Image (spheres, coloured by chain):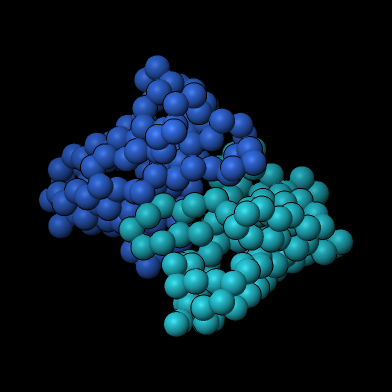
Chain colours: A blue, B cyan
């Protein structure tokens, strides 16, 4: 079974530019989560999709961040315009059941975003 | 949200059993305890989850006392490849935001 795939693995952009991160969850997983770790800080929750619906986006830092999950399959996270403090690693996770089932959430390897 | 406290780092030697204890004094009735492992440049990987008493799988054991205010992850006979950061998470799991990542415990396994 393929795991959670994130693309790109690394991205370096200039301040003010736009970047779009993509996450392909495990096939059939209705729940998709975005987390991020900014430099020196802990991993923080951003938002949660159930299929194509945003179940909770309370962790989104501001309106420069837009997440979508059209069709309930893959998800994108767009940062526009990017700021220096957006640099960090963005993780995506998916699960079939709420609570992560017996195998927990499956995380992707993350996208390392560097804003210069 | 329940806050967890773990040792920042631990050292061990190959072949030893490692026990990492996590404190979660404010754990709620509906909360589960979940442990994740993270290697550099990878996302966290699920290890084990429990609610009370003892849970064991092919990788680890999780011991939870009756008051559930702490838990201990036990890794039997660690190897060099077990060097990683281990996170203790507490939440009801209904939504991702209930899993609050702390700094974790950086385990270093020495030869």
Depth check: A65 or A105 in front? A105
Q: Position of residue B37 (x, y in %)?
A: 51, 59
What percent of the width, then of the height, locates residue B77? Answer: 59, 72
Residue at point 45%, 59% (across, down): B38
Q: Nearer the viewer, residue A7 or B94?
A: A7
- Residue at x 48% of width, y 77% of height: B109
Q: Residue at 72%, 65% (x, y): give it.
A: B71
| Residue A59 shows in this picture | no
Which quadrant is home to the N terminus of chain A?
top left
Q: Residue B92, relative to residue B62: is it above or below?
A: above
Q: Is A100 rendered above or below residue B78?
A: above
Quadrant of the rendering where the C terminus of chain A is positioned: bottom left
Residue at horizontal 41%, vertical 61%? B39
**Image quarter of residue B87:** bottom right
Residue B89 or A60: which is nearer the viewer? B89
Q: Is residue A43 above or below residue A107?
A: below
Q: Nearer the viewer, residue A78 or B61?
A: B61
Residue A30, x across and y down, in percent: 52, 26
Residue sitting at the far left: A14
């Amino acid at each position: 079974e393929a795991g959670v795939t994130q693309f790109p693995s690394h991205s370096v952009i200039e301040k003010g530019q736009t970047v779009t991160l993509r996450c392909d969850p495990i096939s059939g997983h209705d729940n998709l989560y975005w987390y991020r770790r900014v430099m020196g800080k802990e991993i923080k929750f951003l938002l949660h999709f159930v299929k194509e619906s945003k179940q909770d986006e309370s962790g989104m830092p501001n309106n420069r961040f837009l997440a979508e999950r059209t069709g309930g399959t893959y998800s994108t996270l767009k940062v526009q315009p990017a700021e220096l403090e957006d640099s960090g690693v963005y993780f995506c996770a998916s699960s079939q059941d709420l609570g992560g089932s017996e195998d927990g959430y499956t995380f992707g390897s993350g996208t390392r975003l560097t804003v210069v | 949200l329940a806050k967890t406290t773990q040792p920042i780092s631990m050292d061990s030697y190959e072949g030893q059993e490692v026990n990492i204890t996590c404190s979660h004094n404010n754990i709620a009735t509906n909360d589960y305890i979940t442990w994740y492992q993270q290697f550099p440049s990878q996302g966290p990987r699920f290890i084990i989850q429990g609610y009370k008493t003892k849970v064991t799988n092919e990788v680890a054991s999780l011991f939870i006392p009756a008051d559930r205010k702490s838990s201990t992850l036990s890794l039997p006979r660690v190897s060099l490849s077990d060097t990683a950061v281990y996170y203790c998470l507490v939440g009801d799991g209904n939504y991702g935001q209930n899993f609050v990542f702390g700094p974790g415990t950086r385990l270093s396994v020495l030869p």
